[in-house]
Amino acid sequence: METLQNKIDFALVIAVNHANPNGDPLNGNRPRETYEGYGEISDVCLKRKIRNRMMDFGASVFVQSDDRCNDGFRSLKDRADACPELSDAQKKKDREAYAKAACAKWMDVRSFGQVFAFKDGKEGVSVGVRGPVSLHPAFSIEPINIESLQITKSVNSITTDKKSSDTMGTKHRVDFAVYTTFGSINCQLAEKTGFTMEDAELIKEALHTLFENDASSARPDGSMEVLRLYWWKHDCKNGQYSSAKVHRLLHVKPKNELPKNIQDYEITCGELPGLSVEVYD
């Protein structure tokens, strides 16, 4: 299959309704926020969800989470060592062949890139792959309001004659907020990793259905929603316009001072001559 021949830019508008979109482990797992109080979803968190959707679509993924692992390997090194092409390239100390084999094997490697840095005794491997798909962190349009709830345990953890004291805990969630994130797909890097237009279409479908099969206690079904996906396909490899200029076309503005639902936001997108956009609502 031919590698990607047209630069792509995209933008995503996300709604969060009484959910924790991305907890901060260094802050009691409270929803991430900037110093100014705006909500944040890290690019690592978004890529994790995209990888999960890739797996749902049947694509081979290298970086699998423990709760979504489907091949039985318990570490990245075990997964890499089980690939014969990677083992042969490592024995020959051919870093280019190693990277090429990894890109051909796993879609997330040829999309986002990957650092292979494993050491086993005196032998080891250190190979870096730059991927064509870049993704920004998502930030909320307005400063977020974080609600904190106290929770208790009503059952003993172990068998005992006495009822154990209720264990107190805390859950945090965002009341309501709208986030935006942006990304691009670079043709020059796509040529190096073998990223194709078919891969780009899978990325688009993953973004459009980002929160399917992603429910948890912190993110109940329906609490996270993709409102809009904007997909710009340029007519050349280098792009007709810079990514920054394309991303500035998206405008999300609250209609009042205290927006509480998606109807309280106005979402518009400008135009650039000769550049068409696909909108998924």
Image: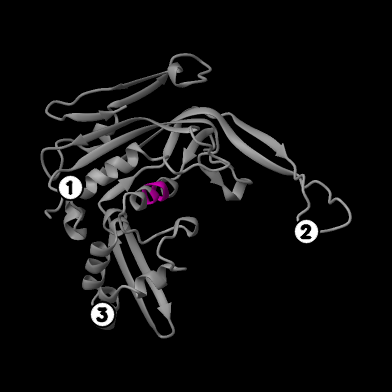
204 versus 99 height, above or below = above
In the displayed structure, 14 sits above or below 126; it is: above
Residue that mark 1 sits on: 197
Q: Which residues are magenta?
A: 47-52
What amino acid type should be assigned to the residue bearing mark 2?
Ile
- Residue hosting label 3: 88
Q: Is residue 185 visible?
A: no
Q: Main secondary structure of the magenta part?
A: helix
Q: Is residue 249 left or right of residue 116?
A: left
Q: Are marks 1 and 3 in contact (CB under 8 Å)?
A: no
Name the residue at 65% across, 40% down: 171
Q: Earlier in the sequence, mark 1 or mark 3?
A: 3
Estimate how packed mark 2 is, as few (under 14), some (14 to 19) or many (20 or more) residues with alpha carbons within 10 Å.
Answer: few
- Amino acid type of disc 3? Asp
For the point 53% across and 39% down, which residue is it? 219
Left or right, 35 with respect to 128, comes to: right
Question: How far apart in space, not on screen, are marks 1 and 3 (Cα)?
Answer: 29 Å
Q: Which mark is residue 116?
A: none
Q: Residue at x 23, y 63 (%)?
A: 104
Q: Secondary structure at mark 1?
A: helix
Q: Residue 179 placed where, x, y %?
A: 43, 32
Does label 2 or label 3 sit earlier along the sequence?
A: 3
Foreground mark, 2 or 1, reads 2
| Point 29% across, 41% down: residue | 205
Q: Which residue is mark 2?
A: 158
**Quarter of image, res 241:** top left
Amino acid residing under circle 1 = Met
